[in-house]
Image (tube, helix red, strand yellow):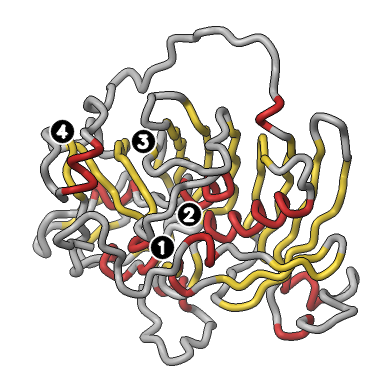
């Protein structure tokens, strides 16, 4: 990701608007194509795949195109290629509507009229990859009581907001924030999905290993929209990497005596992800978002993630909570054809 200019688009990156392009097949069925640009090893980033569902839901309810809350459960591994999204109208209301959405993948249901296998089919169970519940609304019409709560990123505040002109014109000029690069000799260098974002981190050390503060934008130079929030809240599930030993001679030992070697390759799949939107980014979206990702406990191969997103004005944009696993990298490719790829994370 190191480059001479901040605005240079990394090779192979697909514009986000193209990566989440949706086609309506019928009144409740939509087609998508999961891009290889968002792979983590052989498995696409779960937040990106969720953004496909958010995009389909926005198309499905044009009078209520914004999601207020969303809950996603990741049932089976997705893969790059065609996908079908089926949306069920659970409750349609004047102000809020609830939808149930399922993303399916598999070669057996690519033709009409049977887009997906029947409910009793074992193929249907295997084909269901992501299930989600969404509350949809029109955030531009929200009216009601507003009170100042004094919320800040406490107890450890992040550095002052950056000089965005410096970030745009020079990769390393802001006095508080620096461009984040990824070494090629550990798991970071093998995660293709990371090339879709540009990250700036504090010049000082992070306040704690369990906390990540940063500013993020899409590397394709498009603005971040509400539908892209599914991806953005899941673009940094790498809290564990802060504990990685700094040399090959070192290794970290967890509370349960599991060893964490310098060369260990991990995969951090998301099991459950919840998002609540606090402020719409509008139809044009925004270029930069501030993010704080924090974990309260990492134990027995499982970690929680709390994600807070703010805009350049310091307004709260979204809150998200995740349940992630910490698995060996070999689990990412187990039982899956690599289609000519090397199969590594």
Q: Secondary structure at mark 2?
A: strand
Instruction: Identify which residue is drawn at 47% across, 47% down.
Output: 224
Instruction: Identify which residue is drawn at 74% across, 64% down.
Output: 85
* Residue 26 x, y percent position in the rendering: 85, 67
Task: From the image, tell me which residue sits under label 1.
Answer: 267
Q: Secondary structure at mark 1?
A: strand
Q: CA distance from mark 1 to mark 3?
A: 24 Å
Task: From the image, tell me which residue sits under label 4.
Answer: 176
* Residue 334 x, y percent position in the rendering: 49, 79
Task: From the image, tell me which residue sits under label 2.
Answer: 325
Task: From the image, tell me which residue sits under label 3.
Answer: 290
| For discs 1 and 4, the disc positioned in front in the rendered view | 4
* Residue 237 x, y percent position in the rendering: 41, 50
Which mark sits nearer the N-terminus, 3 or 2?
Answer: 3
Instruction: Identify which residue is drawn at 88% across, 40% down.
Output: 91
* Residue 43 x, y percent position in the rendering: 50, 70
Which mark sits nearer the N-terminus, 1 or 3?
Answer: 1
The quarter of the displayed image where residue 206 is located: top left
Which mark sits nearer the N-terminus, 1 or 4?
Answer: 4
């Amino acid at each position: 990701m190191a480059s001479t200019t901040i605005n240079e688009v990394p090779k192979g990156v697909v514009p986000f608007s193209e990566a989440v392009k949706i086609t309506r097949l019928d009144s409740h069925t939509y087609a998508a194509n999961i891009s290889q640009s968002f792979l983590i090893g052989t498995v696409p980033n779960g937040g990106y795949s969720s953004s496909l569902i958010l995009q389909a839901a926005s198309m499905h309810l044009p009078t209520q195109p914004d999601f207020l809350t969303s809950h996603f459960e990741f049932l089976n591994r997705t893969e790059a290629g065609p996908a079908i999204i089926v949306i069920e109208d659970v409750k349609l209301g004047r102000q809020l509507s609830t939808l149930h959405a399922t993303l399916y993948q598999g070669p057996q249901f690519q033709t009409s009229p049977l887009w997906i296998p029947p409910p009793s089919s074992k193929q249907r169970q295997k084909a269901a990859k992501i299930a989600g519940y969404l509350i949809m609304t029109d955030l531009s019409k929200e009216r009601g009581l507003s009170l100042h709560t004094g919320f800040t990123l406490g107890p450890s505040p992040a550095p002052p907001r950056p000089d965005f002109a410096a970030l745009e014109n020079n990769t390393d000029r802001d006095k508080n924030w620096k461009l984040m690069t990824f070494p090629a000799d550990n798991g970071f260098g093998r995660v293709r999905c990371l090339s879709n974002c540009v990250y700036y981190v504090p010049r000082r050390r992070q306040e704690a290993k369990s906390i990540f503060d940063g500013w993020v934008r899409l590397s394709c130079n498009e603005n971040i929209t509400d539908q892209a929030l599914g991806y953005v809240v899941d673009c940094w599930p790498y809290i564990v990497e802060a504990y990685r030993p700094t040399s090959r001679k070192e290794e970290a030992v967890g509370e349960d005596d599991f060893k964490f070697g310098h060369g260990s390759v991990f995969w951090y799949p998301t099991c459950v992800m919840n998002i609540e939107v606090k402020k719409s980014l509008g139809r044009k979206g925004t270029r930069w978002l501030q993010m704080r990702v924090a974990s309260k406990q990492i134990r027995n191969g499982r970690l929680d993630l709390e994600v807070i997103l703010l805009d350049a004005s310091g307004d709260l944009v979204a809150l998200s909570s995740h349940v992630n696993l910490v698995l060996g990298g070999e689990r990412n490719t187990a039982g899956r054809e690599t289609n000519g790829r090397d199969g590594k994370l």
